[in-house]
């Protein structure tokens, strides 16, 4: 016949083709490996109230998956109630984060790179093992809510004084002896929780927190309250239960926003039980807050 017959490939040539195909296949498999892992995590992200949100809460994680830090679009990240002991510097790559929840882990420190999260507005790092926070956190000047409760913190870096947008600060259940100086510079504070620390005094600078509505310092060892505290005209709840107070400032009647003696922990008003108050203050208080104010007012 006139047509050419196709030549059969030798065994050697077949082997070379097979090896070449396997190599190309291996290269294809390796290249998308990391990004495909990131895509698997991305599938768990949702849009919640307009925010790109990912929750990895209660997953038993003792370290964060490396591909997580590829998801730069994330705005809300929940890593709460895991077993994390540390966070990598790559945390700083998630520069679109608005809310970061680290509640209930075993973190002994926060990476300095947290200061790169310029859009961060809410940080929950309570119930960890933090003894300090990095100075770089002060670069997160957009923070509005910061909870560091239930840690082992003794103070805060001075850089946090730049947090002029902070409205809620929870430092309860720590080892704080003196209210950190930077706190008195947080002029936007509305809520300040310092219960169950080791406080003995409150500095006169407390008067600088002119927007403060709620101040909780129960469960400390405070002996006296500064008269400057009584200049906080916006104060609606003052909790000084379980301290060492024997008296109150005569200017306390100026705190007209307190309105009444409070009983329930969440009630607005003055909480002042379980203090070794002396007579006649102790007796006057039996008539309520108005009786105390009438007693303190100059005639």
Image (cartoon, grey):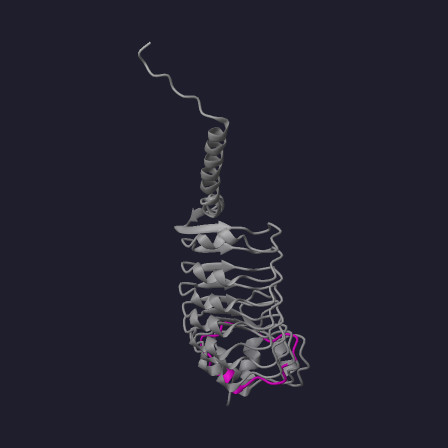
In the picture, which quadrant includes the N terminus? top left
- Magenta segment, principal secondary structure? loop
Residue 251 coordinates in the image, percent (x, y)? 51, 86
Residue 246 coordinates in the image, percent (x, y)? 65, 85
Q: Which of 254 and 116 is in front in this view?
A: 116
Indicate whether 171 appears above or below 10: below
Residue 84 coordinates in the image, percent (x, y)? 60, 58
Judge left or right: residue 157 versus residue 245.
left
Furthest residue to the bottom?
A: 299
For image coordinates 40% across by 63% down, the residue present is 119
Judge left or right: residue 294 versus residue 47.
right
Q: Number of numbered discs present?
A: 0
For image coordinates 54% across by 52% down, the residue present is 65
Furthest residue to the top?
A: 1
For image coordinates 51% across by 77% down, the residue present is 157
Indicate whether 214 appears above or below 76: below
Q: Which quadrant of the figure has residue 178?
A: bottom right
Q: Is residue 98 visible?
A: no
Q: Which of 257 and 10 is in front in this view?
A: 10
Q: Which of 278 and 97 is in front in this view?
A: 97
Q: Is residue 199 magenta?
A: no
Furthest residue to the front?
A: 2
Q: Can residue 60 be seen in this view?
A: yes
Q: Is residue 228 magenta?
A: yes
In the image, the segment drawn in magenta is 222-243
Indicate whether 21 appears above or below 154: above
Residue 197 coordinates in the image, percent (x, y)? 63, 75
């Amino acid at each position: 016949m006139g047509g050419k017959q196709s030549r059969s490939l030798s065994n050697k040539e077949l082997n070379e083709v097979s090896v070449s195909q396997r190599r190309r296949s291996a290269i294809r498999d390796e290249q998308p490996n990391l990004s495909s892992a990131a895509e698997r995590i991305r599938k768990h992200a949702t849009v919640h109230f307009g925010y790109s949100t990912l929750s990895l809460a209660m997953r038993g994680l003792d370290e964060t998956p490396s591909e997580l830090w590829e998801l730069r679009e994330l705005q809300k990240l929940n890593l709460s109630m895991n077993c994390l002991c540390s966070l990598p510097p790559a945390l700083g790559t998630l520069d679109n984060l608005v809310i970061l929840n680290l509640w209930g882990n075993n973190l002994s420190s926060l990476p300095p790179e947290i200061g790169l999260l310029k859009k961060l507005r809410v940080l929950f790092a309570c119930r960890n093992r933090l003894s300090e926070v990095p100075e770089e956190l002060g670069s997160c000047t957009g923070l509005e809510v910061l909870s560091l409760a239930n840690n082992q913190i003794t103070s805060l870096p001075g850089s946090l004084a730049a947090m002029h947008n902070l409205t809620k600060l929870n430092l309860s259940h720590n080892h704080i002896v003196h209210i950190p100086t930077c706190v008195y510079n947080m002029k936007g504070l509305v809520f300040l929780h310092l219960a169950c620390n080791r406080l003995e005094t409150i500095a006169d600078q407390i008067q600088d927190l002119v927007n403060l509505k709620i101040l909780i310092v129960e469960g400390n060892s405070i002996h006296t309250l500064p008269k400057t505290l009584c200049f906080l005209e916006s104060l609606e709840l003052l909790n000084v239960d379980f301290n060492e107070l024997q008296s109150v400032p005569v200017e306390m009647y100026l705190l007209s926003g307190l309105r009444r003696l409070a009983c329930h922990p969440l009630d607005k008003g003055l909480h002042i039980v379980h203090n070794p108050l002396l007579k006649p203050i102790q007796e006057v208080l039996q008539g309520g807050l108005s009786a105390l104010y009438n007693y303190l007012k100059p005639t």
